[in-house]
Image (cartoon, rainbow, N blue to C red):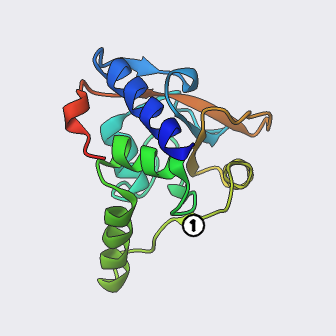
Amino acid sequence: MKHVYMAACILLYGIFCLTGKAYSAKDLPFQIIVHAENPYKTLDEKNLKRLFLKKTKSWPKFKKKVLPVDLPEKASVREIFSKIVLGKNVTSVITYWQKQVFGARGGMPKTVPSDQKVIEYVAKYPGAIGYISSSSKVSNTKVQVIQVKLKKKTMSDLSW
C-alpha cells in the first residue's frame, strides 16, 4: 500500500511541477506548516530547502530562529518531502546531518513521531517549520499552512 501511495504522489508531483506555480496543500502529498505569527504565506523550493537544511538560520522578515522539525525516517511523507524539496532521499539527508554534527556546524532538526506532534511543535515555537501529510487536518489556531512554489521539473528529475 505504501508503494501505491508513493507512486500516486510521484505522479501528482510530476503533473503539478510542470507549471512552476504556487501550490496549496491539496495539490501536493504534503503540507508545509509554520506558526500563525509567521508572516510568510508562500515559500519557494529554494528557500524551503535552505530552511530545512538550516542554511538559513533565522526568518528574514520574522527575526525568529528557524526551527525545522522532521517526521521519522520510515515515514513515507518524509521520503516524498525529502526528494521533492531537498532533492535527496532520507538516507542522504541523514548523512548530511551526520556531517554537520560531526563538523560542529549545527545540530539536526528535531524528529517527532507523527503529524500531530509536528503540529504541536510548530504551535509551540514561533520560528518552527514542518511538513505533514496532505490528508492531516490543521485545526490548531497557532499553526498555518503555507503555499509552496515549485520550480519546473519533470518526472525524470526524480530518482526513486
At 53% from the left and 22% from the top, the residue drawn is 24
Q: Position of residue 57 (x, y in %)?
A: 41, 58
Quick check: 9 left or right of 45? right
Which image quadrant is residue 92 in?
A: bottom left
Q: Residue furthest top?
A: 19
Residue located 39% across and 33% down the image: 10
Asked if one can make out residue 125 in the rendered structure from this viewpoint, the answer is yes
In this view, the residue in front, 130 or 134, is 134
Say which quarter of the image contains residue 30.
top right
Q: Amino acid at mark 1?
A: Lys
Residue at figure coordinates x 42%, y 24% from the top left: 12
Residue drawn at 28 percent across, 18 percent down? 18
Q: Nearer the viewer, residue 52 or 133?
A: 133
- Give residue 81's position: percent from left, percent from top: 44, 45
The local secondary structure at tag 1 comes to: strand
- Lateral position of residue 91 relative to residue 154, left or right: right
The quadrant in which the N terminus is found is: top right
Q: Which of the 4 image quadrants contains residue 38?
A: top right
User: Can residue 63 be seen at all in this image of the molecule?
Assistant: no
Left or right placement of residue 117 versus residue 103 in this view: right
Residue holding disc 1: 110
